[in-house]
Image: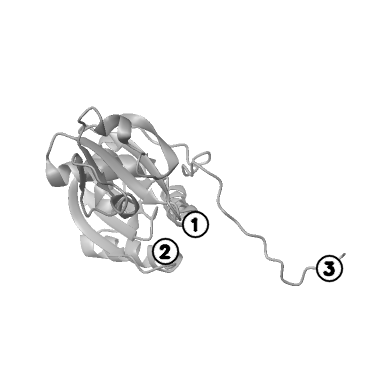
Amino acid sequence: MSYLLHIDTATEVCSVCLTKDHELCAIRESNESYAHSRLITLFIEACIKEAGIQYADLDGVCVSKGPGSYTGLRVGVSAAKGICYALDIPLISVDTLTSLALAGYSNLCEEALYCPMIDARRMEVYTGLYDVNGEPLMHNQAMILDEYSFDSLFNVGEKIVFCGNGSSKYKGIANRHHSQFIEIQNSAKHLIPLGFKKFTSNLTEDINLFEPEYIKAPNITKSTKNQLNTV
């Protein structure tokens, strides 16, 4: 019997759940904007209390590694690392897009390609393409969407299921018979199958070296407030 804590803060959703083996014991979620750093510790404590265990009973922490929000990922990974350091337990990471694609298949149970999309601002998304087993058919990437983005697949009759908080961008411009859109957002519960499999296979991360998968550098604007005018 193993207790795993699962954390997903890759998007606007702050989500934490706790499992006994692969059975869900407790979950806390919120899509309140800019609240990850305030809620993450509260959610972790609430899940542990609801499950009736102590921190010392945890056997590992599974975290959504990205891609996604730079700030959100930092909050989740930092919390996961802190617990793993303190308790000397393993850190497990799950690709955010893979977990979302498998959640899409679990929802529909239909043969298709699954294309999760995470909002990356404007018409850009973080995306990948997966088969029903979660095997990647396209590298995770930042993609600027247009109406022709998936023509090569649609033209050979492939059905593609789109999901995630970035999929609405493509839905607004897509006009394809073989496309389907489903309302599935990020959640820590989507990490459970892959997280438990990696834990039992001892596929863990080096806590000192692990970093989230950002794909691209964060968009940081330097403040010009109080800067001297040297012209």
Residue on which the image places disc 2: 36
User: What amino acid is found at the position of numbered circle 3 in the picture?
Assistant: Asn
Asked whether 96 or 120 is in front, the reply is 120
Q: Are marks 1 and 2 in contact (CB under 8 Å)?
A: yes
On screen, residue 206 above or below 168? above
Q: Residue at x 43, y 51 (%)?
A: 123
What amino acid is at disc 2?
Answer: His
Q: Could you tell which of marks 1 and 2 lies nearer the N-terminus? A: 2
Q: Quadrant of residue 154?
A: top left
Q: Residue at x 28, y 31 (%)?
A: 153
Which residue does the image show at 40% across and 68% down from the upper left?
33
Query: How far from the left and from the top, in percent, is residue 16?
Result: 31, 57
Amino acid at dot 1: Thr
Q: Quadrant of the N terminus?
A: top left
Which residue bears the numbered disc 1? Answer: 71
Few, some or many C-alpha atoms within 10 Å of disc 3 (few <14, some 14-19, many ≥20)? few
**Marks 1 and 2, Cα distance to the nearest angstrom?**
9 Å
Rounded to the nearest whole Å, what is the CA distance between mark 1 and mark 3?
31 Å
Image location of residue 203, percent across then percent down: 35, 32
Q: Which residue is mark 3?
A: 229
Q: Between 185 and 179, which is closer to the camera in this rendering? A: 179
Within-10-Å neighbours for mark 2: few <14, some 14–19, many 20+: many
Q: In the displayed image of the protein, which residue is found farthest to the right? A: 231
x then y, percent, for residue 221? 62, 59
**Residue 201, visible in the rendered structure:** no
